[in-house]
Image (cartoon, helix red, strand yellow):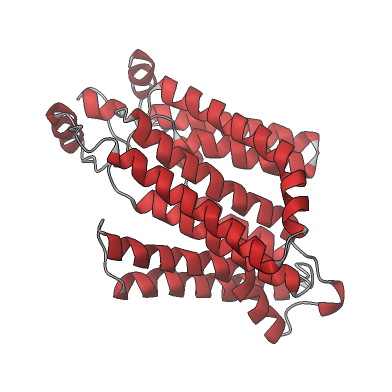
């Protein structure tokens, strides 16, 4: 707590810088950037980052519930909540995503300057969460540690797993992604069920509400979203691979049009289906949420690239498969 208060007592001048770096750790930032990489620059890297995002988001959602640890502004009215997040604090999703995703990018690029940027970004994203009052130092440290473990496992296991998957039939590949997605749902919901008799301390609720960010840490949305995107991405990658992939390169105007068309489709699925699908924590609303985000994942991986082909925005002679 002393570290957080020291940082906040520096004044308001660091706030814009910290808000910028914390934005670099939001899932929304990755969902804006990763499609651009996949559609316009490097299909393989974009696919790797997207799968890693689904993995790290799933793990973080489960661990937050398992630890059910408060955020600083839940337990002390001296801490200003300069951002908002209704979920539990440990581990920091921003710190975890920063190491796992920026680390994946650095390993893919294999360049010193990229490593410098990735390490600096991970550090500043973690520091920003302290200044903004969103996390304790232990939350950030554990987030960095979990992110590093996931990155190490991903780099170690990616090649043999992909070799095995590519050796299976399309049906077996789809079943594999469906089983992984189902496992994410089961583990996440079982973890939530384990807290069915645990009550959120009234003091946490009161203090957080006074800070302007009331806690709502028992939602299933994050788990459902991660599982759905994982299955949608996986099935889409299988389909586009079967069709020979697509070429992310080309004239600058083609890349810009691809991104605009692709993001318009993404927004239509995200906002359009949100407007007509039911909301809530019950089974049926969560099932519709799974459909919605599964379609978004499939659109990014396969739907948009097929539209790009139809619009002659790709070169079929030089397709790059996200193998």
Q: Position of residue 103 (x, y in %)?
A: 66, 37
Q: Position of residue 167 (x, y in %)?
A: 78, 58
Quarter assignment of residue 175: bottom right
The residue shown at (72%, 47%) is: 161
How many circles with numbers are drawn on the protein? 0
- Looking at the image, which is closer to me, 232 or 128? 232
The residue shown at (69%, 86%) is: 310
Residue at the farthest top position: 2
- Looking at the image, which is closer to me, 196 or 129? 196
Q: Check the image and report above or below for 4 versus 249.
A: above
Q: Check the image and report above or below for 70 versus 224.
A: above
Which quadrant would the N terminus be assigned to in this image? Answer: top left
Q: Check the image and report above or below for 28 versus 200.
A: below
Q: As drawn, is 32 to the left or to the right of 65?
A: right
- Looking at the image, which is closer to me, 230 or 319? 230
- Looking at the image, which is closer to me, 25 or 11? 25
The residue shown at (41%, 63%) is: 290
The residue shown at (31%, 72%) is: 277
Q: As drawn, is 202 to the left or to the right of 66?
A: left
Quarter assignment of residue 312: bottom right
Question: Can residue 311 be seen by looking at this rendering?
Answer: no
Which quadrant would the C terminus be assigned to in this image? Answer: bottom right
Q: Position of residue 306 (x, y in %)?
A: 66, 79
Quarter assignment of residue 193: top left
Residue at the farthest right position: 317
Question: Can residue 1 be seen by looking at this rendering?
Answer: yes
């Amino acid at each position: 707590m002393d570290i957080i208060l020291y940082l906040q007592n520096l004044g308001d001048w660091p706030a814009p810088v910290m808000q910028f770096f914390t934005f670099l750790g939001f899932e929304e930032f990755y969902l804006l950037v990763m499609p651009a990489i996949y559609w316009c620059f490097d299909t393989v890297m974009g696919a790797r980052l997207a799968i890693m995002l689904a993995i790290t988001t799933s793990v973080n959602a489960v661990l937050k519930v398992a630890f059910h640890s408060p955020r600083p502004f839940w337990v002390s009215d001296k801490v200003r909540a300069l951002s908002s997040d209704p979920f539990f604090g440990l581990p920091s999703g921003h710190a975890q995503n920063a190491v796992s995703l920026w680390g994946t990018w650095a390993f893919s690029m294999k360049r010193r300057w990229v490593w410098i940027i990735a390490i600096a970004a991970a550090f500043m994203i973690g520091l920003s969460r302290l200044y903004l009052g969103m996390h304790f130092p232990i939350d950030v440290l554990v987030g960095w540690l979990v992110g590093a473990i996931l990155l190490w496992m991903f780099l170690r296991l990616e090649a043999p797993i992909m070799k095995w998957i590519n050796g299976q039939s399309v049906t077996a590949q789809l079943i594999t992604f469906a089983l992984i997605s189902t496992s994410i749902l089961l583990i996440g919901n079982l973890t939530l069920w384990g807290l069915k008799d645990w009550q959120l301390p009234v003091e946490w609720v009161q203090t957080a509400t006074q800070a302007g960010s009331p806690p709502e840490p028992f939602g299933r949305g994050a788990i459902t979203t991660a599982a759905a995107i994982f299955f949608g991405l996986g099935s889409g990658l299988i389909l586009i691979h079967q069709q020979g992939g697509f070429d992310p390169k080309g004239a600058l105007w083609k890349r810009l049009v691809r991104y605009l068309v692709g993001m318009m489709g993404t927004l239509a699925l995200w906002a359009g289906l949100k407007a007509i699908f039911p909301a809530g924590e019950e089974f049926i609303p969560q099932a519709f949420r799974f459909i919605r985000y599964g379609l978004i994942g499939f659109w990014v991986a396969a739907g948009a690239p097929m539209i790009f082909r139809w619009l002659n925005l790709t070169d079929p002679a030089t397709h790059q498969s996200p193998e």
